[in-house]
Every structure is written in C-alpha cells, then in structure tokens.
Amino acid sequence: MNNIGTTRRDFLSRASGGFGAIALAGMLGENIAHAEDPLKPRAGHHAPKADRVIFLYSTGGVSQVDTFNHRPQLTKDHGKSITASRWLNTSGEFKRFLIKPRYNFEQHGQSGAWVSELFPHLGSVIDDVCVLNAMHCDSDGHDKATLAAHTGSAQFARPSAGSWVSYGLGTVNQNMPSFMVLAPSAPYAGTQTWGSDFLPACHQGTHVLPGKEPLPNVRPQMAEGGLQQMELNLRNKLNEIHFKKRAADQMLNARIRSFETAFGMQREAPEAFDLSGETAATLGLYGIERDTTAGFGWQCLVARRLAERGVRFLELIDVGSSNNWDSHGNMGDHAKLAKAIDQPIAGLLTDLKQRGMLDSTLVVWTTEFGRTPFHERANHAGREHHKHCFSSWMAGGGVKGGIVHGKSDEYGIRTAEDSVHTHDLHATMLHLLGIDHERLTFRHAGRDFRLTDVHGRVVDQIIS
Amino acid sequence: MLLQSPRNTSIWNFLVTAVAICLTSTVTNCSAQSDEDFFESNVRPLLVKHCQECHGEKKQEGSLRLDSRDGWSRGGDRGQTIHPGQPEKSLLIEAVKYKDSDLEMPPSKQLTEQEIAVLETWIKRGAPDPRTESTTTTAMSVEEAKKFWAFQPLKLPAIPQDADHPKSQNPIDAFVLAQLKKQKLSSVPSADRRTLIRRAAFDLTGLPPTPLEIGAFLNDKSEDAFESLVERLLDSPAYGERWGRHWLDVARYADTAGDGSDYPVREAYKYRNWVIDAFNNDKPFNEFIREQIAGDILARDGSPEEYADRVTATGFLAIGKRYGYQASPTYQYLDFADVIDSVGRSMLGLSIGCARCHDHKYDPVSAKDYYALYGIMQSTKWAFPGGEEQKRPAHFPPLVPAKEAARLDQAKQETLARLDREIAGLKRERAELNPNFLAGGADLGLESQKPGQPPGQPWVSAGPIDVTTEAQSPFDHIHPKGKVGVRLGSGQPTDGLRYVFENGLRATPGGQMHFTVDFRTVAAAEQKGAFRFYLGRGVIQSLAVQCSATATEFAIHNGTEWETIRKLTPGTWYTLQLTIDPDTKMYSGFVGTADDLTVFNNKSTGANWDGVADCFICDGFGFVEGPACARDIDNVGLQSVAFNAPGTGPILPRIMETALTERLKKIDGRINNLTAKRQTTAASIAYPLAYGVTEGSPVNARLQKRGEPHRLGEEIPRRNLEVLGGDLVAKGAGSGRLDLANWITRPDNPLTARVFVNRVWQWHFGRGLVATPSDFGTRGEPPTHPELLDWLAAKFIASGWSVKSLHRWIMSSKTYQLASADDRGNSAIDPNNRFHWRYARRPLDAESTRDAMLAVSGNLDREVPLAHPFPPVDTWGFTIHNPFHAVYDSNHRSVYLMVQRNQRHPYLALFDAADPNQSVAKRQPTTTPTQALFLMNSPFVHEQSQDFAKRIITVTGDDRAKTLWAFETAHGQIPEEAEVQEALNFVSAYRQQLSKASSQNDQEKAVWSALARVLFTSNQFLYVD
C-alpha cells in the first residue's frame, strides 16, 4: 500500500483501513467512490510476481484421470468394483466399477510430467506449467461449482475473482476495461460468473462475444469520423459550461472522462481485436487461419493482445453450458473439446514466453470439478461429476514451472497429499498479484466480504 | 489465543494425582513432566500450529474451538471432541488419524506419528488444559439489544425550537437545522423553480417535465404552487411506476425464476403491477406489508373484490431466486434462505439470513430465530415456476376463491370427460366399422412410419432406435404383411419403445385380453443383458404382464418371479401371444415359431394390477442385468378377441366399399373436430393464477446445524424473533404467516416504520438518515438524525401508514428544496452532505435515463403493457444446458421491461439497475466507458435522437428558436447564451460538413439528430440538480 498518496492514506486511516475503505464510502452513499477513480492503478499489499491474469476456464467438468493425473493402477484394476462413499451428494455406500482412462499418458519435457494424449501441444510446454493434481471443491452441481470456481461462493451471487482483482489493483490502460471475458457463451450460472455483484460495477467483466463485432456499440454509427469528433467536442463544451458551476462534483468529471475513454476505446479496442498485423508464424502457433474471428485460438491470441494493452484480468471460456466437457455418456467427447483448446493454449504460453511476458502474466486453467474414475455400470463409456479430486494448472507469473503439486489416491478418487481447494487457488492467484486475500475486503450488508470468504490458503510450495 | 491464562487451581490439584503414561519415547521427557509442563511444551504448540487457525478465535470450523478447555468441552457439530482419559473414544484422535475420509484433520497434511502420539498421551492423561475461555464476544444478547437505538420503542420526539425561526417552521427543517447548527453548518439557498420542478418530476415520476408543465409551474404565483405540483405528480400513474420500482429493487423482483435454466414466470408481472397500483392508490403501508406476507390468508376472509389482489401480493415471497429443478423439498432450504433474508432486510432492516448457519455474530438474532421463521415458510405451499427436471409450473395459487376454483376446475374436467367420451365412442365406432382395424389398430400405425428414423407419433421412443425394412416380421397371421418393423439398439435401460392404445382394454366380467408381438434378437448382437415387454396401465403405473428375453433365452414374469421358458436363437423371428384373465389375474400363452411353440399356463399377473391394459413398452429392464441386446420387433397387437394362431394363413388387406369409406371419413372428421376442441379446452385457463403462495400443512422446522439441511438439531417452534417479542404461532393458526405479518406491522414493532421512512428518505435524497437502509443492526450505520427518523416514523404510523403523506411532508420542507450548489465551508466539515446543507445532485438511474429519452423523443408509450411475450408453456424445455433467454424490445416505461435473472437485460445491467438476485437496498451508480459507448453509438440512442430531431424540425422559427426549444425540452432549463452559441456553431458546421453528401431533407434530420444526441448524453440531461 506504499504507493498511495497522502490524501488517500488519510482517508484510509479514517475509515476502517485497507481496501475496504473505498467500498465503505460507496456504501455510505458518499461521492468518494467517484472522486477516487476506482480503476486507477494501485499497488497491492506486497511486491507482486504477476501483473495480470489470464484465466482459462473449461466448462462442464474435465476428467482428471484422462488429462493430467496419471493413475496406472486405475488401468490395472479396470472393471473391479469398489465401494464409493457418497454419490452425487447422496450419502451412503455405493458399489461402483473402476473405469480405466480412455486416453494414454506420456511423460513430457525435462520434468517428465505425465500428460495424456488429449494435450500433446500442452505437453510440449509442460516445463513452464505447474500441474495441480489434488484440487477439490464443495459442490457436485454445475451451477454451484461454477459459481464457486469464479466467486468463491457456491450459493449466492458474489463478485467474480476478476472483479476483486480489478477492485484491488485498478488497471493501467484507461482506454480499456480492467476485466474482460472472452467467451462464446456464458457458462453455467450465466453472467454472474463475471459479475461484480456488490463491488462497484466498473469492476464487472466486460463480456466479449467472439465474432465479427466483439464489443457492442464500439463502432461509431457515423461513417465519417469528423462528425463524431464534432459531437464529442460540443458535448465537452456543454459539459464544461455545466461543470463550471458545479466544479466540486467529481462525479460529473468522471462522466466527462468516460466519453474520452470510450472515444479512445473506439480506436484502441477494435485495433486490439484486429489480428491482421499478426504474422503467419504467430497465427500458426495458435493454430488459426487468417481472418478467423472466433474459436479458442482467436480468444487466446486476442487475450495476448489485450494483455499487451494492459487489461488486468482476462477470462477465456471455451464452451457454454451445452455440448461441453460434461461427458456423462461418452468420454470420447473429451477429445474434440481438448483438440479445440490444446494448441491455442500451448501457443499462448509459447507466445507470451517469447515476448517476455510470461514472467509477469499468470495463466491459470481450471474447470468446475473432475469426473468419477468409476461408474455404476461396468465398462460404461461416460463419467459422472466428481468434486473430491480434480486437476488444474498454473503457469508463468511467479509459479514454478515443470512441477506437479498434489497427489491423489491410486485411482484419482480422493486427494491424498498437498490438496488445493478452489479457495486456495484464489488465495494463491491474489498472492501472486501482490494481494493478501485476507485483507482484500469489501464492506457489504454489515460485514467485510472476501473472495475467499473465511477460507483459503496460499500454496507457497508452487511459488518460485 | 496465545495469552497466558491464570493458573487454574484444579489443574494443580489434578497434577498431584495424575499418573503420567508415556506411549513413545520421542515425546520430550514425558514421564518426568508435570501435566502443565507437558501441555505447555508439547500440546499447546501443536494445537496452535495445526488446529487453532480454523478452530480458534477467528474461525470456528464445525462450530469447534480448540483454543480453550471450555471450547473443546462444548464440542462441535459432531458432538464431543475429547473424552478425557479415553483417546480411543475421542473424535480428535479419529480425525488426526484420518480414519474417516470426511473428517481428516488437519486437512492440508496429516500430523506425524509423534504428534499424534502427543495428543493421545495428553488425552490419556485426562487432557489437562489450563486455558480458560477468552470472554471477548461480539454478539449482542436480546437483553443488550433493548438498549440499542434501533430496538428502542418508537416515541414522537418534541420538535426542536429555535429562537431564530418562527414556530410555523416545517418540523423536518427544525430537526435538520438543529443538527446543522450543532455541526456548525449553514444551508445553501433554495433551488430555483426550474430546478425544483425537474427535481420533483424525476423524483416522483421518473420523467422530465415538459416545457408546458414548466411554464404552468413558473406562472403559478400562489403560495402553495410547489405543493400543488407535488399533488399533481402524486396523482399521476407515473408516480407508482417510479416508486413501485424502488420497492421492486428491495423485493428482488424478476420475471424469471433464476435456477440454472432460468424459467420464465408468466404471472410475475401481476405482482409488479400490484406494487405499482399499491403506490398509486396510497395503500396503507402496513396493509402493503401484510398482504405481501399473508395476502392469501387475508383474501379468504376479505371482500371478494380484493381477493385476486391480495393473493397476487404474496408474489413478494415467491419472486426470489429459486434453486430447485423440480417441485420437491430438496433445495427448498436455499429458497427459504432467500425468503427469510429478504423479509429480514426489506421489512425489518435485519440480516436474519446470517443466522442460518450460526447465531448472528453481531445482532440479536439466533439460529433458533431463523428456524422459527423457517418453520413458517415450510408450512407454506410455494408456487413452482418450472425447472430442469419438472419443466412445467405448478401450485400457482388461483386468483379466485378456493370454492370457485374447485367449481371451475370441475366444470372444465367435466367438459373434458364429455369430449373424451364422445371421441372414444367415435373411435370405437370407427374400429368396429373398419375391417382393416386389426389388433388395436392397423399395425398400430407402424407401416406408415418413415424407415431410417425413430418411430414417431403415436409411438414414443428413446435411445438408439429406428424403423427399418430389416425388422419386418415374417409372420402374417395377425396383421397383413408389411414392409417395416422397429430395430432397437442397445442403450440405457430406460431406452426403448412405447405404444399407448387409444382404446385400451379394461376388465369386464368374464372378458379376456389378448396380446401379441413378434420379435427376434439381432444376430450380431453382443450384449448379454435382457430386454423386456411390459403390458399394463400407463407407463409402469399398473403392471399386468411382463416378459423378457436375452439373445438366447426367453422368460416370463410369474407373480414376483422370473421364469425362463425356452431357448432362443439369435436372428430367428418368434411370435408371442398372451391371453390374460383379469378376473383371476392369471395369464397363459405361447412363444416360438409356427412349428416350435412353447406353451405356458396359469401364470400370475402383477399382484396389484388394476385391470387396465393400455400401454405396451419394450425397454432394457429385463431378467438379466447389463445392456440389453439389440432386437427387432413388429406386429404388436392388443384386443378383446382371440388372435389367429401362427401358420393359419395370411391376413390380407380388405377392400372397402365406397359407402363405408365415406362413412369412415365422416367419423374421422368428427373425431378431428372434437380432438381440436378438447385441446383448446385443455389448454384454456379455467381461472387466472398468481406467482405466490398458499397455506401448506403446519410443521415446525428442526434446526439445521451449520445450515446443512441433513444435519438436524432440535425442533424449533414457529414464532416471532425473540428480540421482537418471541410470540408463538397460535395453535390452529395455520402456517403462521398471518401472525408474522401482524408482528411485522404492529405499531410497537420498533423497526418496520423506521426502516421504511428511512428508505423513503433515501429515495428522495440519495442517502438515508441511516446510511445502511437494510441493516439497522449493530454493523449498520447509526442515524444522523435519530429524532427526525423517529418523528417521521411516528407520524407515518399516525397518518395510517400513508406513503403519499410522507412525500408531502418531506417535499414541502426547505431541506428538500435546497439548491445543489457547493459551499466550501460546509464541504470542509461535511463533504458528503450527511447533514443536508444542500440537496445532493444525483445521476439519473437506468430507468429514468431510458424513459426520459423516450419521453423527449415522443416515443414513450404510457400504457401498461400486457404480459411478456414468453414462448407458449407447452414448448418449454429449458435446461441448465439450454437456459431460457430473451430480451423484449418495447417503448413502454422501463419498469415494464422483462427483468431476467441469470442473463441480465444488457441495458439494465450496464446502467446499474438492481441485480434481481437479492434484495437491493441502494443501487451503486457507476460511470464506465462502456456506458459512454452505449450513449454514443447504440441504436437506441440514435433512434430516439432521430425522432427527437423530427420534433425539433417542426418547431417554427430559425435555428436559434429550434435550438432553444430543444434545450428546454431535453434539459428543462433555458440554456445560457454561451451554450446556445456553441450549439448554433455546431449546427452550422455540421450542416456544412454534410452539405456535399445528401439531400437537404436528410441533411436537416442528420444535423438535428446530432444535436439531439449531444443533448441526451450531456451531464445536464444525465444528472438531476
């Protein structure tokens, strides 16, 4: 907090202190939330390892034992029955049959980390990745688990992780939003996944729909640029005359400035989305053709361009609430979903690294939960929801590359060592950005709220 | 808790007799150590390091504390943690040993063997622990609460007297002035009349005043010109549309249900309109609350004219975010969490919801209070909006009295039954006349199905299934030989084929039923499981007979047992015939090929069979588990006369005489007419419904430990919050909702009136006297003007809870009519105007911005729109994977826009309208570049600007005259000369820029549209002084 000027510090010490102060002001209906630009860049609680986050989200629940958690014993014991306690939130004992992974595993890189054949490209850059194989969460339902993965709360609307980061750190490029979401459709729980809820709404994720017009209203309706400039000038002049008599009101000033920023966005945002300047080699890295306007490769490449332009938190979602990783019927469905994201993600990591951005960019990949290594019917082709153990990974931004953190039991059913809860993942993300997850609070409805609620633990072992 | 506790004498006594037992040699000097030393050197550090972070002062996971003897003695949610002297019985040891996968402590990493041994030794030694409980507790008891300001009884305070001001001063001003003086502040001058009318109009109606209205007000020289203006605005229907919307924020109103699939709620708008009407009619606020909690009960004993309105009012309870996928109690604890929290926040200013998992940490609300209210909600029947698993709405209360509803229901049922009888009679007649109507129908319509596709109507199918020429049976003794049969692949057990017989058979004395089907296993099938033939009433509603086959064996169900009847050869066609005697509930039959029939006799039907056979199913629930083998079936038949035997010669299609064909055609026509009529009748609404609640069966809830519905504690009687009296629901009083409504609104409830007048104050001034309008508890803000708050609340009750009276008092005060000008001296002392030395400038909210543009452009439709154009209910199949989503355009006021919960309306979300997922006390206005993009470039703003331009162009006079009119119409103010000059320069420069391009007509439209756009998006428009 040492970068904050005297006035702000005074204010903070008057209020309850910490990041919550701004919020408190907002809640009291005071104008400070307007006076103090909520998006102004500011330092966190300690020196950050990462300046920004690219959060990759695969919707539906990705099977751990078919991707990153190599469990040879599961293959050996295929078809054997086990007793599973609890089944999709129903307590009791259930007889279930072990189902071997549908995909083969191979060791990759110097580190020799195991990655399944679903992610050959990612395997090739695995030495930059820290795999988390003992993830767990609290919900077996898509809605709840998706909300929890984004907001820390499985039941109630709460601000998304990106909103918290925007609220805590602001953003360096005022011509762009601080938190952007590139997604063809919303995952489960809809736009709540990137909502700011009780945080000031400028921290909400700006949803970009891949396609020819990714940001609505970003294009002027007038063909001729000069006309719009004339409008902007007249608006500014009228606003100035209006403001002269009301000069103490920063709220009015903020509105005047927002038009300037929007005007800038008209220029800068389309450019950020214009891939025509990218070389064939770069497009090739992401596995996309020239003139592509959608798909995960497009999302990843645009994310890099937005990261370069200072956007603080980027979330990329691969698929919406249908036709996703929710492979109840057939694990074969995982193949096409993995194919759609494997090369783009590997391309993103490679591209960030070769541009020297990987060290300052934290890339996180996760999903709402894993899938059962067993099934109620022997030899069944699908897998069900599984909250007790799943896999995620982190890369760049101060995370040790080429390590595997956390172990499950021999079948990938339960976490066994170094387990990481969704709350812990959030705490670690914030920590790498220089934020103490216990001190990033917002006073709402009579209490201080945090992204990690009353939980969360920074996973020190994976920090370089 | 690391503080050193005073030494406890009992520990010292204990020490003398304690027998130290040492289990492992690695524990430091254990045998030689005193218990105290042993605890201090071995146990305390271990507990501090591994346990107390989650079981200490900050957190009490599982309601357990391990930072004091009292803490662990009380135990946690799972009961006693430590049995002194008995480590083997102690849950603590079980947990650290990771014996139960649901209780592995500490969760991050297991303790070492030595550490576990320390804990075992400690417990064996009797768990000596010198630490006493820290007494710092923040929760407030009910006794303490009585001293807290918000729970003090409401009294009418004396109006402060000020020597400098006459006695006739407005009481509100007297209270405000007293505070201003105390704070050494002085108010700024009053606002001018143009500012006042714009402020009052937006405040009361959410719409700008027209130049005509402004003129009338300016010309009204009477003393009470402003009072008359306020009256006129209060009389406008726009008032309810504006102030109803305020309440809808608090009531978390939405038009969709909010579970993953976000089902539309067709009746939600009725509650919205009820709220708007209630404000317009100045319904007494206590009635307003009572009807929202218990309108259905009040309706029962009230006047028939009010019946529908009162039931509609209970929408307040139903309208929250729903969590269930079907009308079952599974997720109701979450629905109730929303309702209890919303009632608490919106009406009482209390965060009761916090007490779901534990007693409130700060306020006098216990978990028992929460479950006392929970019981009331559980005793209530809730309208179910539709969800993923049950896709149709259910239990919506009728808007007519129960008797009338029953009468209308019965009348409708009778009409349907009559139509059914007529249709059935005609069908029977048709079947009897038609010589080709064999065995329940001409091949049951199978021959007319398209090959290569799953069988369609009247068949029902699921899973891998196709009509195919390959599945044509070779038998022709019952149906004429056709071209296609059905091939069923292996799939889920529930996959298969169903046929419902139009003229099902029902038991008649002495009558028999005959059933037949041809089948074969597909020769290549590898699956070992069995498929099944079911015959009975409905979809497994009442089983008559079931048979089953694998690729190689055929079995029949005799009573409760499967009996294998014969071997089968894959690829060979077999025919099955059954003869069922409903009188004796016995059946017999045969299965096989024409020259190889296996006969079976005297088998028992399903014991509970009700004598109706109208449904045939072939699915995968057979006598052998596992995926059923792929099979072909054909020639299904059901009739009351015996079938021909296999090999008795082919049935051929018969030629019909013309007269007969004509007659059949006529019958078909009549059947079609009647069927259409039946459909219309079935779909017709016998009486209107509401999205609300009705009375259920009275039941007390049991406390849910940590808010988890499966971990039940003691039963809690239904009652009022203890801090508000704790009154019990009387026996025979039903759910207790009427009691609850009365407790909330009784005049001695210190909260309800205070909370509401504070809201009204906030909606007028942008900030409440209590700045946390939904939290009057200890974590909320204390009032800036406590006496004024009480004066308003007491007067409000005395006025008969008249909301319009509140407006009149507040708006006639000098405080309301102050200018929004700044003042340096005041700003230095009170920068946020908490003490009302000026009127706080405010941004227009989402609805007002949109409505003002529509009003100024001339496009605003002031009618109340009809129901939302949701898709017809019989098409609803929304799932979490395919949720409902729609945005409906309209030119009606924004309060009437369809408010969607999950995928929010893009405009409303962008401009910070209330998030309908929870009760919103105060909107958080933001200023973002994406809003600016909308204002600059959206089609909506451009359309309104173009239409405003059309109005500007019709103004007679030169550019200056047009410009002046445009300014006054958009901003309500006469522009300064500098502004006019800028605008005129803009107009001529813009015109010049365009001149080369287009016709003069288009040019003028474009020029004035551009000016209109600037006026719509400038601060003079977007903020109210």
Image (cartoon, coloured by chain):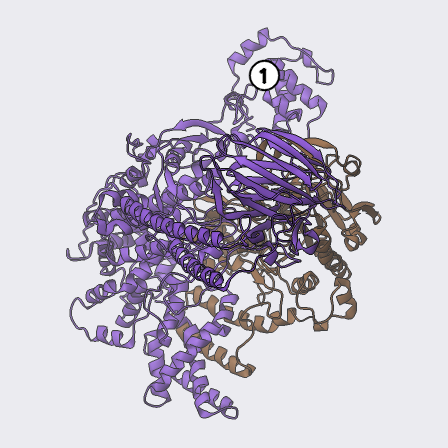
Q: Colour of chain B?
A: purple
Whether residue A25 is visible to the viewer of this picture, yes or no, is no
Chain designation of label 1: B
Which quadrant would residue B226 be assigned to in this image? bottom left
The residue that mark 1 highlights is B127
Q: Helix, strand or loop at disc 1?
A: loop
**Position of B735 compared to B993: left or right?**
left
Q: Colour of chain A?
A: brown
Say whether residue B673 is left or right of residue A3.
left
Closer to the camera in the image, A434 or B475: B475
Question: Quick check: B435 above or below B491?
Answer: below
Residue A175 in the image: above or below residue A66: below
- Looking at the picture, tell me which residue is in the foreground, B735 or A241: B735
The residue positioned farthest toward the top in the image shown? B17
Count of numbered badges drawn on the protein: 1
x then y, percent, for residue B198: 30, 69
User: Which residue is pictured at 64% across the width and 72% down the height?
Assistant: A271
Q: Is residue A102 above or below residue B363?
A: below
Query: Which residue is pictured at 54% across the width and 32% down the height?
Result: B606
The spot of residue B830 in percent (x, y) is: 37, 56
Q: Quadrant of residue A162?
A: bottom right
Residue B863 position, x and y percent, is 32, 67
Residue type at tag 1: Ala
Residue A262 appearing in the image: yes
For disc 1, the neighbor class at 10 Å (few under 14, some 14 to 19, many from 20) is: many
Percent position (x, y) of residue B852?
37, 70
Task: Answer with left or right where residue B357 lies relative to residue B808.
Answer: right
Instruction: Tell which of A12 and B789 is nearer to you.
Output: B789
